Amino acid sequence: FERDGIVCSFDDDALYAIAHKACDNDVGARGLRGILEPLLIPLLYKSPSWTGVTHLRITSEFVRGEGDAIIEFEAKEEG
């Protein structure tokens, strides 16, 4: 995301949800890749076409498949 000028961050609850999935699947650190890739790859493919996006926030709802990641746009100047 950095290549496209987008900051990606994870809410604390999202990190706990990822850790919970890792424990449920009995995977270690290497298994985290298998959890994160299906979540992030679709966003990575879409992000180059996003205009004005500055921040992508990964939420626990997104990790659990119950919602979307939060996409924040740059503020437009009023003039």
Image (cartoon, rainbow, N blue to C red):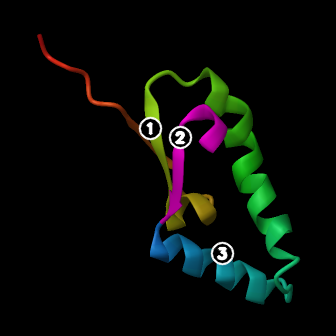
Q: Position of residue 68 (x, y in %)?
A: 53, 48
Q: Residue at x 14, y 16 (%)?
A: 78
Kind of residue at badge 3: Ile
Task: Choose top left, top right, bottom left or bottom right for residue 35.
Answer: bottom right
Q: Which residue is mark 1?
A: 54
Query: Which residue corresponds to mark 2?
Result: 6
Whole-number angstrom distance, CA of label 2 to CA of label 3? 21 Å
Query: In the image, what residue type sits under mark 1?
Result: Thr
Residue name at image x 76 percent, y 82 percent: 22
Marks 2 and 1 in Cβ contact (< 8 Å): yes
Q: Which residue is mark 3?
A: 18
Q: Which residues are magenta?
A: 1-10
Q: Position of residue 60 (x, y in %)?
A: 52, 67
Relative to 17, 30 lies left or right: right
First-in-chain label (3 vs 1): 3
In front here: 20 or 10?
Answer: 10
Q: Is residue 67 visible?
A: no
Q: Which mark sits nearer the N-terminus, 2 or 3?
A: 2
Decide if residue 49 is on the left or right side of residue 37: left
Q: Which SS class for mark 2?
A: loop
Q: Residues within 10 Å of mark 1 (few under 14, many from 20)?
A: some
Residue 5: say if magenta: yes
Q: Residue at x 84, y 86 (%)?
A: 28
Say which quadrant the N terminus sits in: top right
Q: Which numbered disc covers residue 38?
A: none
